């Protein structure tokens, strides 16, 4: 007799979400389809960790079911016909619905070939036993746990276990995923899984840059990414991201500081800038191109290393605010922040922080139009006067509009 978790599910899900899920099960039943809640939410339900990221899998047609569910509910439906999946966005909650599928891998690292299948097929393509459980939502079997790979036992024993010996070969991103869950949950890799992970670490070379970058992004969004990186180093995996990456006390300290200053936002780009801090420009370029980074984060990382070579010019104690502004205004803010956290020099860090907290926002009160009205002709001279005004403002030499105007009148004749 399969275990039934309906009592736990009713306690775990907030009432409105529970209702949606039950309705979905009933609707699937009407359509003659079996519906399941799958993946991370079952893991987290059993662990008592909040997770309302609900993935539904239907033995049948996900798009048809999603269309029915969205009807009359003021929900917005997003359909991905190619993947047989749909997302139903309710007012402040969403449900992902997918058709149960069977997968096969034509070659390591490639995306799998996909066909519709049963829930058992859908579970056997998953990464780890703790992520390969499902709860039935159709009314007659509501709450029935499907646990073909003993994920519940592995949760009890705090183990991360792959489902078959070729798992990392089929999809080496699971190597990074394994380390991420291990550290997030305070679990351990099951012995054979650890052995295979090390055996197959080189398979990460078969994975596209985009997919590796996505996994790195997920690692950096964890509460303590440095722990995952440290574990990746212990197991000889970190050098698959970059041959020169090291996880050490320096990085841990910096990551902690990042979290202190970031508070609410996820400091992903800043972590990246610190991660590459010890690389040479060439090494960084190899990393950027291997992981196919988009323009913005790539620029922040490049700027980080460029600014690092210029920090000596910011070490002089008597620098004027306008000098600091001139040295820094062309760099991405994350690159400046990364250098402020990385620099061993207090004075350099202070100058960088002054720029970030204050100087970058300083603007003259007068603009080009005001200057023209005051008789300054358009052209390069107007630009020069605006620059001088900006400098004076940065250095606190003018504070009011009146003072700015006085300065413009005096410079109009000298510049
Ligand atoms: P979390 O979002 O909390 O990290 P999750 O389990 O919801 O956990 P997702 O990345 O959203 O993780 O993936 C959803 C489910 O899809 C997983 O639980 C797992 O069963 C499956 N999955 C995701 N990536 C893979 C993969 N590379 N190989 C096999 N199964 C995977």
Image (cartoon, rainbow, N blue to C red):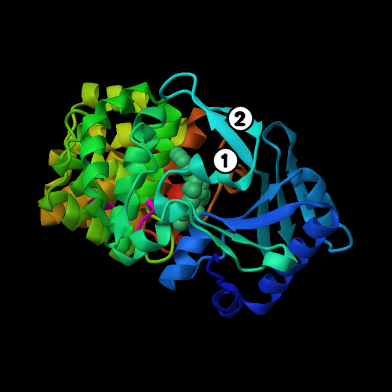
Numbered tag placed on residue 121 in the rendering:
1
Main secondary structure of the magenta stretch: loop
Q: Quadrant of the N terminus?
A: bottom right
Image location of residue 79, percent across then percent down: 75, 42
Residue count near mark 2 (Cα–Cα under 10 Å), binned few <14, some 14–19, many ≥20: few
Q: Say above or below: 387 vs 70.
A: above
Secondary structure type for disc 1: helix
Image location of residue 255, percent across then percent down: 24, 55
Secondary structure type for disc 2: strand
CB contact under 8 Å: marks 1 and 2: no
Image location of residue 43, percent across then percent down: 45, 62
Q: Earlier in the sequence, mark 1 or mark 2?
A: 2
Q: State the residue at coordinates (27%, 62%).
A: 186
Q: Is residue 319 visible?
A: no
Mark in the foreground, 1 or 2 = 1
Q: State the residue at coordinates (67%, 59%).
A: 94
Image location of residue 6, percent across then percent down: 60, 74
* Furthest-front residue in this view: 1
Closer to the camera in the image, 405 or 115:
115
Q: State the residue at coordinates (59%, 35%).
A: 102
Disc 1 and disc 2: Cα gap in Å? 11 Å
- State which region is magenta: 221-226
Closer to the camera in the image, 119 or 280:
119
Q: Which residue is mark 2?
A: 114
Residue 337 among those drawn in magenta: no
Q: Quadrant of the C terminus?
A: top left
């Amino acid at each position: 007799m399969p275990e039934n978790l309906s009592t736990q599910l009713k306690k775990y899900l907030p009432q409105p979400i529970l209702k949606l899920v039950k309705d979905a099960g009933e609707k699937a039943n009407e359509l003659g389809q079996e519906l399941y809640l799958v993946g991370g939410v079952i893991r987290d339900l059993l662990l008592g960790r909040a997770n309302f990221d609900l993935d539904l899998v239907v033995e049948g047609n996900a798009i048809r079911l999603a269309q029915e569910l969205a009807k009359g509910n003021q929900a917005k439906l997003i359909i991905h016909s190619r993947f047989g999946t749909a997302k139903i966005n309710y007012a402040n909650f969403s449900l992902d619905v997918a058709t149960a599928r069977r997968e096969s891998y034509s070659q390591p690292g490639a995306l799998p070939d996909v066909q519709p299948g049963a829930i058992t097929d859908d579970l056997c393509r998953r990464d780890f036993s703790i992520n390969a459980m499902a709860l039935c939502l159709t009314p007659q079997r509501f709450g029935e746990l499907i646990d073909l790979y003993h994920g519940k036992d592995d949760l009890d024993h705090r183990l991360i276990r792959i489902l078959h010996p070729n798992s990392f070969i089929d999809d080496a991103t699971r190597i990074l995923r394994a380390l991420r869950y291990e550290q997030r949950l305070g679990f351990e890799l099951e012995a054979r899984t650890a052995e295979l992970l090390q055996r197959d670490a080189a398979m990460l070379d078969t994975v596209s840059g985009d997919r590796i970058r996505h996994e790195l992004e997920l690692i950096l969004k964890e509460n303590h990414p440095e722990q995952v990186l440290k574990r990746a180093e212990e197991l000889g995996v970190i050098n698959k991201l970059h041959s020169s990456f090291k996880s050490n006390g320096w990085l841990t300290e910096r990551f902690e500081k990042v979290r202190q200053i970031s508070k609410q936002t996820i400091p992903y780009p800043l972590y990246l800038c610190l991660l590459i801090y010890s690389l040479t420009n060439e090494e960084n370029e190899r990393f950027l191109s291997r992981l196919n980074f988009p323009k913005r984060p790539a620029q922040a990382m490049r700027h980080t290393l460029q600014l690092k070579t210029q920090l000596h010019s910011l070490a002089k104690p008597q620098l004027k605010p306008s000098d600091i502004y001139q040295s820094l205004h062309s760099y991405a803010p994350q690159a400046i922040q990364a250098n402020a956290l990385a620099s061993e020099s207090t004075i350099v860090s202070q100058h960088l922080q002054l720029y970030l907290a204050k100087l970058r926002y300083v603007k003259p009160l007068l603009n080009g139009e005001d200057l023209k009205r005051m008789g300054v002709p358009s052209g390069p001279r107007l630009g020069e006067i605006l620059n001088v005004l900006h400098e004076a403002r940065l250095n606190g030499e003018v504070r009011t509009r009146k003072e700015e105007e006085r300065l413009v009148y005096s410079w109009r004749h000298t510049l």
